[in-house]
Amino acid sequence: QVQLVESGGGLVEAGGSLRLSCAASGRSILTAAVGWFRQAPGKERDFVASIGWLGGSTRYADSVKGRFTISRDNAKNTGYLQMNSLKPEDTAVYYCALRYEFGDPPTGLNDYNDWGQGTQVTVSS
């Protein structure tokens, strides 16, 4: 069974940047899609971005297009989310997830089987 640990969250001013990491252990992520989701207080967990197992296919929520970039390093068994031009509305707990499936990376919450514990991102105005 795979374990996922997110890191890189923190407090940043609006307009700043953060890079989140999702380190996997126990199983290779090579054949998995990697997804990032976020959950603000009192709200549902929402899709942010996903990347296919080969890394050539990516998907983004409209709210983060042009600001966030998802990537992966299969050799390091790690996924990343580079977040630029952060806004206060990006404040949330960010979760990474895996789905072991070929093809286009899914965007649905229920499409993913393995989840990390989350990392807090707080953007001050």
Image (tube, helix red, strand yellow):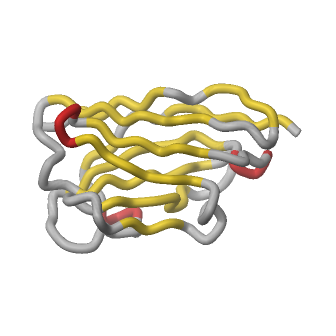
Which residue occupies 22% across, 32% down? 76
Determine whether 37 is above or below 5 in the image: below
**Percent coordinates x, y for residue 67 in the rendering:** 63, 56
Determine whether 16 is above or below 10 in the image: below
Which residue occupies 55% across, 50% down? 38
Q: Quarter holding the N terminus? A: top left
Which residue occupies 66% across, 37% down? 17
Decide which of 15, 92 is in the foreground and name it: 15
**Percent coordinates x, y for residue 6 in the rendering:** 41, 32
**Percent coordinates x, y for residue 21 in the rendering:** 42, 34
Work out which residue is located at the far right of the displayed protein and give it: 125
- What number of labels is visible? 0
Determine whether 31 is above or below 83 in the image: below
Task: Tell whether 64 sits left or right of 78.
Answer: right
Decide which of 100, 67 is in the foreground and name it: 67
Q: Looking at the rendering, which quadrant does residue 61 occupy? A: bottom right
Q: Quarter holding the C terminus? A: top right
Q: Looking at the rendering, which quadrant does residue 108 occupy? A: bottom left
Decide which of 1, 6 is in the foreground and name it: 6
Which residue occupies 31% across, 46% down? 72
